[in-house]
Amino acid sequence: MFYDRYVQLCQQAGVKPSAVGVQAGVPKSAVSNWKKKWEEGLEVLPSAETLSKLSDYFGVTTDYLLGKTGPDVAAAPADGDVTLDDFTYAFLHESRQLTAHDKEVLLNMARFMRQKLQQEQELQQEQEREPDR
């Protein structure tokens, strides 16, 4: 299950499995070994450290990589203010080559949009609480 999920995530990211391994800090030989074992019908179980690196790279949980959870469960950032769904995964992939400053600008835009939505919801709730005039 791990290698199937790994290849699927690589395809979604538009990157070859060996390239992802290198970018995530996993030796090419490990990726080759996973593929070989998978082709032989054997289950591949990388080390916890490797799973953690790949989890961080793809923005998914280690349980997802191991096939223990479905695609709707993903890793949340440490501050917990953004969840990772299909849109944000695609956004993450598309923004990978941006500068740190550009990423910060995008993050600030997302925060602004979230605050705007919260303000609109609060206004709507206040209007619903007021008696009709």
Image (tube, helix red, strand yellow):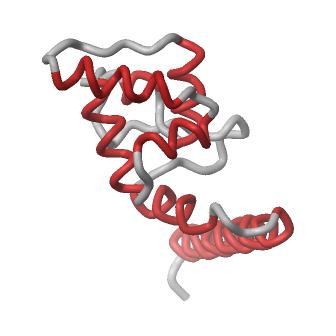
Residue drawn at the location 52% of the way across and 32% of the way down: 55
The image shows residue 71 at horizontal and vertical percentages of 31, 41
| Residue lying farthest to the bottom in this orientation | 133
Residue drawn at the location 51% of the way across and 59% of the way down: 88
- For residue 96, above or below residue 132: above
**Quarter in which the C terminus is drawn:** bottom right
Residue drawn at the location 31% of the way across and 15% of the way down: 44
**Quarter in which the N terminus is drawn:** top left
State the image quarter where residue 66 is shown: top left
The image shows residue 102 at horizontal and vertical percentages of 79, 72
- For residue 31, above or below residue 59: above
State the image quarter where residue 76 is shown: top right
| Depth check, front residue: 30 or 85 | 30
Residue drawn at the location 67% of the way across and 66% of the way down: 97
1 left or right, relative to 54 = left
The image shows residue 99 at horizontal and vertical percentages of 80, 67
1 left or right, relative to 14 = left
| Depth check, front residue: 113 or 109 | 109
79 left or right, relative to 7 = right
The image shows residue 92 at horizontal and vertical percentages of 57, 59
| Depth check, front residue: 130 or 75 | 75
| Residue lying farthest to the right in this orientation | 101
